[in-house]
Structures are given as structure tokens and as C-alpha cells.
Image: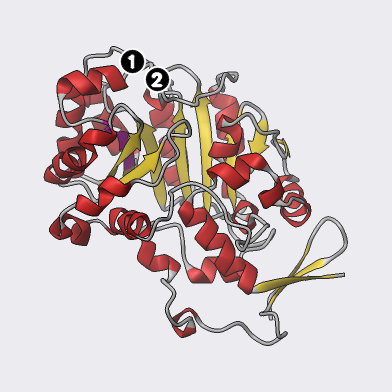
Amino acid sequence: MGRSPNGNGTWLRTRNNAGSTPARPTEREGEMRLEDIGFYTLSDSRARNASAFSPLWRCELLLTDRCNFKCPYCRGSSFNELTYDQARHTLNLWMEQGLQNVRFSGGEPTMWMRLADLIRTAKDGGVKRIAVSTNGSIRWEVYAGLLEAGMNDVSISFDACCAADAKKMAGGMDKFNTVTQNIVKLAQRTYVTVGVVVTDENVGQLVETIKLAHSFGVADIRVISAAQHNKILEALGNVPESILDAHPILKYRVNNAVKGRNVRGMNNTDSKRCWLAIDDMAIADDNHYPCIIYMREKGKPIGKVGPDMRKQREGWVLSHNCYEDPICRQNCLDVCVDYNNVAEKARCVEA
């Protein structure tokens, strides 16, 4: 039975409410395994076994707040741009704790001059998945260089199905053709997901945007309502079944929408603890946050970057009631809620 000490002298024990060994994932009748959602970082095994001493599973580093787009829905925050030495120091701290997957974001991370060097550092350190979140508008030669350095996962914003609407969604930047061409090229070379942020302005074209993104040959399509929109995406019920079968994350979100479930938000019956934060980390400037959304919504950081981050995060998980926190209650994503519910069933807190 796995046990791990936290910073408050209590223990996290892997067991169910009856005190016995938790059921294997396949024994949870009527429930989707986390692996089936489509996010490669999520699994039932991770949810059951994560602790302050297990490998770091997914970490995101915000390199710069600069961006060449001015998307009207953007919740980007102002923070100090990292120097290369700062970024490498954080990456090394993570890799010392068995970092499995890393994401570099911003702002627009391709505007950070030494991104390729940082990617090489991650690759040389044994990180399995090295992801970059980008708006896709940069010269192809830049993306080609990042692929050569070791980038093997790309998330690209794609919020409209025509150039005129895309220009509005990008805050006046006319880069639709460049973005679409880059998506196609990248999808031929590595794992690519496109992210469609839904607002009142583009919800009417949502299905057509998904169809176009599918035609690019991407691995998956992540649809999310903007914080300002935050409505059940009923239009997803009109996505063709053939497209859903090709994209598990999209299918997961469509199935939720059909059942009347929003992409964002918790219910009172959901886990009140964010177990995800134990081995999942977001860093901006010299602060580490529960997640990127929490940082974007101006939530307080858990602490400062340093060797004690895991201990600090476990203490935060055990003491923080997410349902009483309006940022978590209103904005926590469906996949995170489902993960935390699985983890909650596999754990109890003992004095």
C-alpha cells in the first residue's frame, strides 16, 4: 500500500473508503478510464499513485508574456520574462525529480530567443514529451528548428474557419494562411493538437472550425469555452461522428456537452482537493501555481521556485478546499475534475 509523508506530519495513503486496496481501473463499471480521454498525461495509475516523491508527470513553464497576437479573450498575465539561466535552472529542478512531460508557453514562446536550446536541454535530460504552445503564426523555419531540437508535441490556437473571423479573434493580426500552412506541415511531422477557444463571437462557426481543423490531419482538437463565455457548448452535438472517432479528446468533450456538462466548473459532489497539483506544476516568473488557469485568473502562487516545491504543493493540496475557491469552482476543466475524482477515491488522509 503506497504511503508518502507530507509537510504537516500526516500521511497520504492509497486506499478506498473501506480501507482496502482500491479497485483496478477496469473494475470501475460505467466510468471512463482516464487513459481513454485522450490526454497522454492522464492515467488511472498516475491518479492512484502520485505523491510528493513520485516522478513529476507534467510541468509547464511560461517563458515570456510577449505575444504578437492580441486575442480579445486572452487571460494572459503580466510577468517577468525568464532569462535562459532561470529557465534552465527550473527545468533542471524538474528533471532531478523525474520529469516526464514538459510544456513551454507564454505569451508566445517562440518569441523567446533561446527556446531551441531549452528544448535540447529537456531532450538531453530524458524528458519524453516536449511540448510548445503557440499561435502558429511564426515563420516555418522557426518551427522546423524546434522540431530538430527535439520538440515532439505542438498545441496551436485555431479559433475560426475563415480569414476574416480569424483576424478578429487574433486582435487584428492577419495570419490565417500562415497558421493553417504551419498546422498542416507540423501535423505531418509530429503530434499536433489545435485549441479552439469558444466565445460569443465564434460559437456560430464552431462546427465548421472543427471540420477544417480535422482536414489538416491533426492528432486531436481541444475545444474550450473562454472564461468570459463559460457556457455549455451545445453546438458540439452537430459534429460528425466520423470526426469524433478520429479525435478522442474532442469526442470526450462532445459527449460531455451532449450530457449537459460544461468544459469548465466543479460540482459539490466532486473532489474538493486538487490531487493533480502534486505532480503537475505551472511556473511563471519565480512563482509556482496550482495550474495555468489559476495563474491566469490572478490566483495566488503556492510558493517560490526552489527545491521544496513538491513539499509545498502537497501541503497546499491537503489544506486547500477547491470548491470554496471561486477560481477552481468556476474554471476547473472537466479532465482535471475527472482526474481528481479518481484520485480522491483512491486516497484518504490519516493523522
The residue that label 2 is drawn on is: 72
Left or right for 104, reference 311: left
Q: Which residue corresponds to the image point at 45% horizontal and 82% vertical from the top-left? A: 29
Closest to the observer: 200 or 26? 200
CA–CA distance in space, label 2 to label 1: 6 Å
Split into 4 quadrants, where in the image is the N terminus? bottom right
Q: Secondary structure at mark 1?
A: loop
291 or 310: which is nearer to us?
291
Please tell me how crowded label 2 is: few (under 14), some (14-19), or many (20+) other residues with Cα within 10 Å. Answer: few
Q: Which mark is residue 146?
A: none
Q: Position of residue 230 (x, y in %)?
A: 45, 39
The foreground one among 286 and 83 is: 286
**Disc 1 designates what residue?**
171
Disc 2, disc 1: CB below 8 Å?
yes
Mark closest to the chain's N terminus, 2 or 1:
2
Residue at screen point 24% across, 56% down: 247
Region of the chain picked out in magenta, as a range: 154-159
The percent position of residue 147, horizontal first and vertical second, equals 28, 37
